[in-house]
Structure formats: C-alpha cells, structure tokens
Amino acid sequence: MRTQRQVVDYSLQRRAVLRDVKNGRIGALEVCDASPYLRNAATFHGEPTDERCPICRRDNLTLVHYVYGDELKQSAGQARKLADLPVLAMTLREFQVFVVEVCRSCAWNHLIERFVLGRDGLTAEEMLHSDVMVSSGGGGSHRTGQSSHSEEARV
C-alpha cells in the first residue's frame, strides 16, 4: 500500500520467543493464550496464510489487522479485513495498523508488524489520484510482512 510508513517488524522477538519455547524456558501454555475475542476476530476478519502454526503445527496461521487512530472514533481498536485498509487509508489522514498472527487451534498469537497508513503519507499528486480511486471504488494491496512476536502484542 502506497501510504504505508513507519513499519515495525517484530520477527526477531518472535524468533526469540519460539526459541525459548523450544528450549523449555517458556511453556506452550504461556504463549498460547489468545483471548476468545482475538480468536473470533481471526475467524471472522482474519486473512488465512500458508504458514503452519509454530507451536502445534496442526493449523495454518491467520493474520488479524487491528486499526487505531483518533479519526476512527468508536471503531478504533476493531479488527478489519485486509480489503478495508486501502479505503480507510484514502479516507483518513492517519491511523495505525497492528497485525497479529493467530492459530485458531492452539491459541498461539503474536504481534508481527505495526505500521501507519493514511493520506498524510501521500504527495499532492498522489492525493489527486487517490481521490479519483476512492470515488471509483478502487483499492490497493498490502504487504503483510514477516512473522514476529511481542509482549505488547498480547491481545
């Protein structure tokens, strides 16, 4: 997505947590603690991946995109489908997106990426083009990035 900026990738933290689980320093129950809300968000708003869960290896991971920002008002903190993000990015000045990977089988979850979207990241020429795209219903694509884990990601 063109307006994506300030990307933070949590893949190093994810690898460290998985290494600690493998070495027995952290129990699987400590990292497989997705809340029922997060698991429901994965079911109804998540984007399936081709990557197997690193803990149970039974199910593929699902990515959930949470949006936060002042302009979102009451809908801040909600999970959104990936297809909704380009429209929001052309409509709002700035908002943050947190991408969490979830295993619906064992409840593994981890923040993998955080970034900012919105019109503030566009040049004047891109703004003119985006107004045409939004009014015609056009969208864009989003790179989901690498996998990772963070304690602040515990949703």
Image: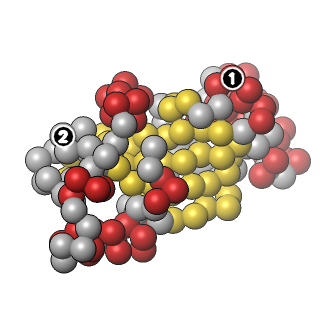
Secondary element at tag 1: helix
Q: Nearer the viewer, residue 1 or 108?
A: 108
Mark closer to the chain start, 2 or 1: 1
Front residue of this view, candidates 66 and 119: 66
68 vs 109, left or right, is: right
Q: Secondary structure at mark 2?
A: loop
Residue occupying the point 20% across, 44% down:
106
Name the residue type under label 1. Gln
**Dot 2 surroundings within 10 Å: few (below 14), some, or many (20 or more)?**
some
Q: Is residue 130 visible?
A: no
Q: Position of residue 21 (x, y in %)?
A: 23, 68
Residue 16 disc label: none
* Residue 118 vs residue 148, the one in the foreground: 148
On screen, 145 above or below 50? below
Residue 27: quarter of image: bottom left
Q: Which residue is mark 1?
A: 74
Q: Which residue is mark 2?
A: 105
| Image coordinates for residue 101, horizontal then vertical, percent | 37, 49
Q: Quadrant of residue 25?
A: bottom left
Residue at screen point 72% across, 29% down:
72
Given the image, on which type of amino acid does mark 2 rest? Ser
